Amino acid sequence: MDIIELQEGIYRPEFIYHGEDLGINYSKEKTIVKLWAPTAENVKLEIYNHYEKEEPFEVFDMFEDLNGTWKVKLKGDYEGKYYLFAVDFGDRIEKTVDPYAKGLAPNSEMGLIVNLNKTNPENWENDKYKALDSAVDAVIYEIHVRDFSTSPYSGIKNRGDYLAFTEEGTVNNQGLSTGLDHLKELGVTHVHLLPVFDYATVDEENRYEYNWGYDPHFYNVPEGSYANKPEGYQRIKEFKKMIKSLHDNGIGVIMDVVYNHTYYTNESAFQKTAPGYFYRLINNCYLTNGSGCGNEIATERPMVRKFIIDSLKYWVKEYHIDGFRFDLMGLMDKETMYTIENVLHDINPNLLLYGEPWAAEPPHLEEYQKIHKGDQRDHKIAFFNDDFRDAVKGDPDGFKKGYVNGKFETYNDIKNGIIGSIDYSFEVNGFTYKPEETINYVSAHDNLTLWDKINKSVSKAPEEERIKMDRLAQAIVFTSQGIPFIQGGEEFLRTKYGNHNSYNAGDHINQIKWERKTHYYDTFLYYKGLIKLRKEHPAFRMKEPDMIRKNLHFIESEDAAIGFVLKDHANGDDWKDIYVLYNPQHHWSRFWLAEEKDFNIVVNGKYAGTEVLHSFQADNIKVPPLSAMVLYIK
């Protein structure tokens, strides 16, 4: 275990500060600077004209203020100046960037005093959060900023940048829509961006390196390597332009946030201002490592919890963010997550909150503090449903199979996913109280892509069969109760060439390969049709458990096939009864329907949507191998 210094007396209750003014508080007439450094003996503020200057042009003594804070008022206009703190602990002086910095020099070398009003795009004051009647109305599309547009076939000018999300009319080399127009064409409601706050492992000025961004450095500033230039206001302006563009086109923005660890420990701003306080320790010196990255943030401590909540509030209010995905939420204590939910939903009731209900290693918390599946019940927080994921396709990286690729024993786990993992019956039940608490998915940035997983698990199957398995997997996700989530590029069978952990593997492995949209256009249309079906038919988006128990009924079928009906205009649907049938087997399978009625098929193995593909009158139907079918009675 790594050792870290803990400053004596840092946990004293009188050091808990409740003010909303930590960091830089800028105005043209004066700037008030406040730092929480409770065990420091002295603090100085150093002002620089440029981030490459070695010596400050002004130095100010800061004065002790309330509850462990240090404060100084700068008279006059300090906009655009860079700054550092010199924190004196008696035996050493630590030069550090402000943990609450709202602007940064390239590569996080200094803080930047920002006039945020000058960073707003035109009409920013009228920009609106993405509106939702319910969280289950969301269709989430996960993407890395750089992956979205670096391909030479993207047709996008600002490749790898925030501004790629502002370009309209872009096409691939066969003339099919890419970028923003592709998102609109597909029909997703939200983009989930892999970490976009400042992270440590990419040189922002040269951008040769590649990383997903799960190596956080500073939490309140956009990452500079995704801007045309990282210095000055550029990254903030371009980030806001991206959000404005997506909002203008009806798409919300979700940030992937990593408040469970920091990339640096002794060199972090947390450690340099409040030694030992921000990290979980054993015997007050040994770092715990529930993150698997060398440390874990002590979210249960008041000033750590305050920092996280202040940071989230800042992104929501200043940048109009529509939701957050919490990396390794299992490392965050329960009270912090409940407080986050209350505070953020007071600002925006439509805000989406979800995350991973697990950790890399067990967190160093008391059992009552830990958050597990089930603890989100009725708290408007959703968890990734890994049980459903594995039931559909098998283990994330290995050869084990799931329901769509040959292991039919996962039959009951598929049913648990279909009903939104609520308490449906004695035999079929899950971890949620409401369906909005489950994120239903079959792949994300971690692990093999769905297409790579299918290829690995059934490598000898013809491509036509593997495509059927892929479509069946997504048909299950989009016709189940809960919140559907897809990894960007899945809609045209995204591959990372079998790399299951491509966090630093570079553009060739990770980029969205827009030429695949042409090659697998029929699959893209299938995904698009599933999304259209879900968005236009509220029966797939029931909000309350009682509604699901009343309106969703499983029907009789052969062998391992699963069928259910959404009855009696469920959730106000125009269609009276909707039948959803899954056949993962290599032979035709029969399903028994209601008494003989006029049925209309809108989804089969080849096509998906809301248009009638075929009509028939019968009391049963046989579904082809490796396919889903959706039919309705008007």
Image (cartoon, rainbow, N blue to C red):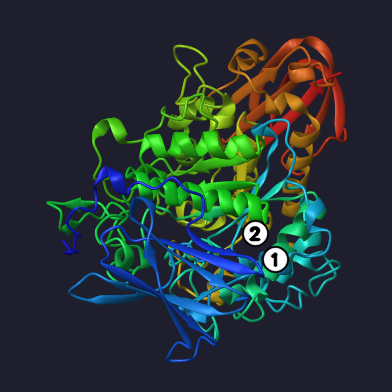
Image vertical order of residue 88 relative to residue 281, above or below: below
Q: Quadrant of residue 347?
A: top right
**Residue nearest the observer in this picture, 499 or 78:** 78
Give, as a three-letter code, the residue at label 1.
Arg
Q: Which of the two discs, 1 and 2, sits closer to the camera?
A: 2
Residue 489 bears which disc, if any?
2
Residue 51 bears which disc, if any?
none
Res. 390 visible in picture: yes
Residue tagged 1: 516
Image vertical order of residue 633 relative to residue 348, above or below: above
Give, as a three-letter code, the residue at label 2.
Gly
Image vertical order of residue 631 relative to residue 229, above or below: above
Label pair 1/2, CB-CB below 8 angstroms: yes
The picture places residue 117, in percent across and down from the top left corner, at 71, 64
Residue displayed at 48% across by 46% down? 309
Quadrant the C terminus occupies: top right
Left or right of residue 300: residue 32: right
**Residue nearest the observer in this picture, 388 or 95:** 95
The crowd level at tag 1 (other Cα within 10 Å; few <14, some 14-19, many 20+) is: some
**Residue nearest the observer in this picture, 624 or 78:** 78
